Amino acid sequence: MTEAGSNEGKRVRVSDHCDGRRFFNPNAPQAPALWRVFEWKLQSRREPAPAFVDDVKPAVPPRRVAADALRVTLVNHSTVLIQHGGLNILTDPIWSERASPLAWIGPRRHRKPGVRFEDLPPVDAVLLSHNHYDHMDLPTLRRLAAGGAPALVAPVGVGELLRREKIGPVDELDWGESLSLPQGGMTIHCVPALHFSRRGPFDANRTLWCGYVIESAGGPIYFAGDTAFGAHFAGIREKLRPPRLALLPIGGCEPRWFMAPVHMGPDEAVRAHEILGAGMSVAIHHGTFQLADDGLDTPAKRLLECAPPGAFVILKNGESVEVP
């Protein structure tokens, strides 16, 4: 069964970010065309990275935390376990060896997950930001579904592939739409991101990409997904209040001439943190898969150089932080 073109021929609602067939970044640069990928690869000066870094000590998170507590654990890449309000929420889960449609080729992990899959606490909800292989990993989602069918939240168009793979049920949200979780008194808001979608050569931007704000009595939690820097951060703060916690991507950012329309660099993540007025930010999208020319740990080193003291927490796989 092929995944590419899963939304082929279907029309979706025309909006400021969709022409009825394909989605786009409004009033912002678009992702580079496919031919420019080959241009980048021909010019690529990728930083060397070790084949594998054996420095992860897997953690065993508590099954639950107190309702007013907020505990976050970096599993790997953009996979974060958020424990709050009596619920356990996973973002963009990936436990596979490769971020790829094939088991024998594609970006391979350089570090193991910081939580073994069998040590996960019960997962109540999964937030998917878009359909790229390093963010929507079908083998992992099948394992999660087999273990108890958590609530799946995804952007518009993504649900078709999940349902076809018998993964679900799934709630699809457009930017500005919201979903109330049946437990915990939380509301999930789908918010804009500047990125793109693709799982094959012919399905570019047929499904939406997004971030999420988890609204709770303890304060908003913002998961940015994959995004470039842009005006949407100010809009999120204005509409949904400064987040208590922001999960902001810092890696996969070089070379800037190619990556700037779709991925922030560490300096831009700092600007986003300041614009959002976040109480604390945690760096994501680094340290496990080398998806661009920046080195495995270079984004974290650069973030340390440019972030004000106390603004960002840089977790290793398996490390946790209790958010004030």
Image: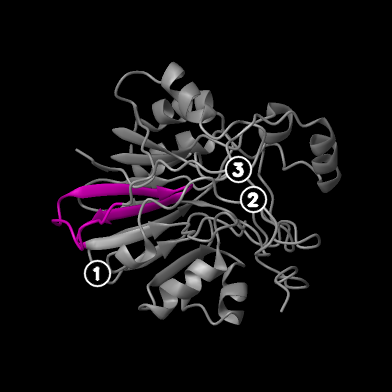
131 shown above or below 241: below
Choose mark 2 or mark 3, whichever is in front: 2
User: In terms of secondary structure, where does tag 1 sit?
Assistant: loop
| Residue 24 percent coordinates (x, y) | 69, 50
Residue 107 circle label: 2
Type of the residue with mark 1? Gln
Residue 82 location in percent, x, y? 31, 53
Q: Is residue 137 magenta?
A: no
Name which residue type carries label 3: Leu
Mark 2 is surrounded, within 10 Å at the Cα level, by few (under 14), some (14 to 19) or many (20 or more) other residues, namely some
Q: Nearer the viewer, residue 78 or 19?
A: 78
Q: Which residue is mark 3?
A: 194
Marks 2/3 in contact by CB < 8 Å: the verdict is: no
Q: Which residues are magenta?
A: 59-86
| Residue at 14%, 51% in the rendered image | 68
Q: Quadrant of residue 64?
A: bottom left
Check residue 82 for magenta coloring.
yes
Tell me the amino acid under the disc marked 2.
Answer: Pro
Q: Can you say which quadrant of the picture contains the C terminus?
A: top left
| Residue drawn where x is 45% and y is 73% of the image | 143
User: Is disc 2 placed on a helix, strand or loop?
Assistant: loop
Tell me which numbered mark, 2 or 3, is placed earlier along the sequence: 2
- Whichever of labels 2 and 1 marks the residue nearer the N terminus, that label is 2
Residue assigned mark 1: 183
Question: Distance between the Cα atoms at labels 2 and 1?
Answer: 37 Å
